[in-house]
Amino acid sequence: MAVYTDITDQELEAFLAEYDLGAPVAFKGIAEGVENSNFLLETETGRYILTVYERRARPEDLPYFLDLLGWLADRGYPSARPVPDKAGKTLKTLRGKPAAIVGFMPGLSVRKPSPAHCREAGEGLAWLHLAGEGYAGRRANDLGQPHWAPLFSKHRQAAEDLKPGLAATIDKDLAEMALAWPRNLPTGTIHADYFPDNVFFRTDGKFAATIDFYFACDDAYAYDVAVTLNAWCFEADGSFNVTAAQALVAGYERRRPLSPAERDALPMLARGAAMRFFLTRLADWNATPAGALVRPKDPLEYERKLAVHREGLSLFGGRA
Ligand SMILES: Nc1ncnc2c1ncn2[C@@H]1O[C@H](COP(=O)(O)OP(=O)(O)OP(=O)(O)O)[C@@H](O)[C@H]1O
Ligand SMILES: N[C@@H](CCO)C(=O)O
């Protein structure tokens, strides 16, 4: 579960007194997620999500994320709009931690996406890229390619403990990626964590909304596609589902066609995207004490995805 911060009824009442949202009707912690504490809040005026920012998100980045949510919502993108308090502030403090209230987005995430879900999700991602154009906020990707080797150097032993010999394999990957990393691709505001748990669907299977923008940053649009391919198109047995991947890209291209350079770059971007999530999972694994309330995600799931991409398998069938 991800509720790191408890909030008493008195604290909630005092906090809500700073807003024009009416009295609380219901308030409960949400178990999903690992990064922040999230609460479902219902007041006389509607349903909201109250988030207390706990871990990775740096406080100085929070205005970037909240302003982005507002920008996207203003352009009709289905993402949660931050709710201002009576003084117009969206970023607040609760229990000494940064906190914000955003609108509740209806819809359901899917655990096992079908190719039809992948198509819809792909379209939702391209829509997000287009809606983000012109957003003035800037945030460099602090988990992008130049940061992987320094991050790994702190956790080499953990990799070795997970799988003897892995550290040398990762070193070699990192060296190869540093040389071959695609540059000069179209860039803009990307989600960077567009996983199935962050995308909602309507009951008819249509794309409904995107949540959890707390890794959003400036990077190549095609890198976001690669992150998404990894998160949506692998089967439980570790194989890559080319049908799902093609559906995802086709859905994306309904709104934003990829250039030949972006398509060509996808295999290397997907390899890098697998590295990025392997590394952050490895770091979390290493930092989480046994018996902690929130179970860290499995780094080896991404090590297996990395291994698939290392083989140079083309995302569209055949060899790259
Ligand atoms: N705006 C929203 N509307 C509806 N539900 C939401 C909204 N924001 C968050 N949730 C719910 O809260 C859960 C956790 O949210 P979120 O994914 O942002 O948390 P997190 O701790 O940042 O998670 P992650 O591990 O994915 O980074 C979601 O799975 C969803 O059920
Ligand atoms: N989506 C990330 C966790 C989000 O912080 C992962 O699966 O590793």
Image: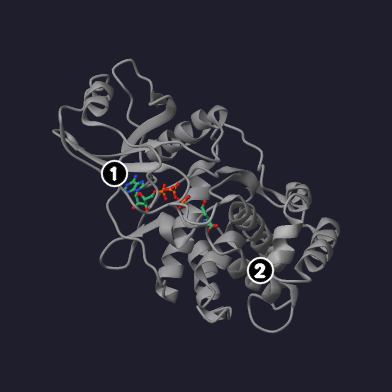
Give the residue number, with chain letter if any, for mark 2: 303
- Tag 2 secondary structure: helix
Q: Position of residue 179 (x, y in %)?
A: 86, 58
Is label 1 within 8 A of ligand 1 (CB to nearest ligand atom)?
Answer: yes
Mark 1 in CB contact with mark 2 (< 8 angstroms): no
Indicate the position of residue 133 as horizontal and vertical percent values. 54, 41
Give the label on residue 104, or none.
1
Q: Which residue is pictured at 39% across the width and 24% down the height?
A: 92
Q: In this view, does 38 lie above or below 200?
A: above
Number of other residues with Cα within 10 Å of mark 1, as a class: few under 14, some 14 to 19, many 20 or more: some
Number of numbered labels in the structure image: 2
In front: label 1 or label 2: 2
Label ID, residue 4 = none
User: 160 or 134: nearer the eye?
Assistant: 160
- Image quadrant where residue 96 sits: top left
* Residue 93 placement, left or right of 108: right
Mark 1 belongs to which amino acid? Phe
